[in-house]
Image: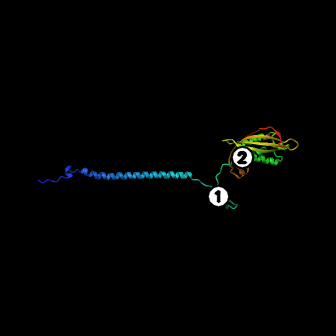
């Protein structure tokens, strides 16, 4: 009897069709699973990129600024000058000191000329809020403080010594000296004064307001007192 050669297939027994088809089946689905995974990774990368772009757009939008331009026109409406409007900057302390000094001088000075006295008071009241105006009204209502009556007998000069802001507040301390010069015979007297003012700066928005109160400095509260008794004039 002739014997057949022994091969791996014949040694393992008869062929199983299910097992024979499993390898191609697994190969095909493995490719599909791999492709699905790749698509998932691609979608995740695109989603991440979209998030980065969205955040970048939000940051750019939040940092965007509109630059206003000021255009000057003539009477015929033709542009004669233009340029970007500058941002309002904090008022220089030296300007605030000058404005406070001017306010005190206008309130306390007594002019012999009634028109000069009236103009000085008008300029002072342009810096006063309703509360400060009420304080000044009450002060000038007394006969001993009425500049119209005082001007009949004397002229008063005001010399500002110091204007200092109290730390971390809107209150300023002002020290000055007043010199009363009699219009007739009499001794020249000099007194020292001190005041505390609470101020706020509100930039003006109209041309008329700019002329009356250029930087928008408003005195919200004020109190003053004499810190030295009258004494003879200095030589």
Residue 37, can we see it?
Answer: yes
The answer for how far apart the CA atoms under marks 2 and 1 are is 31 Å
Q: Position of residue 183 (x, y in %)?
A: 86, 44
Residue 143, can we see it?
Answer: no
Q: How many other residues sit within 10 Å of disc 1, few (<14), some (14-19) or many (≥20)?
A: few
Q: Compared to 10, does 145 lie above or below? A: above
Residue 139, image quadrant: top right
Q: Position of residue 220 (x, y in %)?
A: 70, 42
The residue drawn where x is 70% and y is 48% is 94
The residue drawn where x is 51% and y is 52% is 56
Which quadrant is the C terminus positioned in? top right
Which residue lies under the disc numbered 2? 97
Residue 83 is tagged as 1
Q: What secondary structure is found at the residue carrying circle 2?
A: helix
The residue drawn where x is 81% and y is 48% is 116
Left or right relative to 52: residue 231 = right
Left or right relative to 119: residue 26 = left
The residue drawn where x is 47% and y is 52% is 50
Left or right relative to 122: residue 61 = left
Residue ranking furthest to the front: 235
Q: What secondary structure is found at the residue carrying circle 1?
A: strand
**First reached walking from the N terminus: tag 2 or tag 1:** 1
Q: Compared to 28, does 185 lie above or below? A: above
Q: Position of residue 40 (x, y in %)?
A: 40, 51
Viewer-side residue, 100 vs 131: 100
């Amino acid at each position: 009897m002739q014997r057949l050669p022994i091969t791996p297939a014949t040694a393992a027994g008869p062929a199983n069709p299910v097992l024979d088809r499993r390898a191609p089946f697994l190969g095909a689905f493995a490719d599909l699973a791999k492709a699905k995974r790749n698509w998932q990774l691609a979608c995740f990368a695109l989603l991440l990129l979209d998030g980065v772009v969205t955040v970048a757009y939000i940051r750019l939008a939040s940092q965007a600024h509109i630059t206003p331009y000021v255009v000057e026109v003539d009477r015929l409406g033709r542009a004669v000058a233009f340029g970007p409007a500058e941002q309002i900057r904090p008022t220089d302390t030296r300007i605030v000191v000058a404005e406070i000094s001017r306010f005190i001088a206008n309130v306390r000075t007594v002019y012999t000329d009634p028109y000069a006295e009236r103009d000085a008071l008008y300029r002072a009241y342009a810096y006063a809020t309703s509360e400060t105006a009420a304080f000044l009204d009450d002060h000038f209502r007394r006969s001993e403080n009425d500049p119209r009556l005082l001007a009949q007998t004397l002229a008063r000069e005001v010399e500002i010594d110091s204007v200092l802001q109290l730390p971390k507040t809107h209150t300023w301390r002002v020290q000055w000296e007043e010199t009363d010069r009699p219009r007739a015979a009499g001794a020249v007297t000099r007194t020292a004064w001190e005041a505390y003012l609470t101020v706020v700066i509100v930039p003006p928005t109209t041309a008329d307001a700019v002329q009356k109160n250029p930087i928008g400095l408003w005195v919200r509260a004020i109190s003053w007192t004499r810190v030295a008794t009258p004494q003879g004039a200095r030589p």
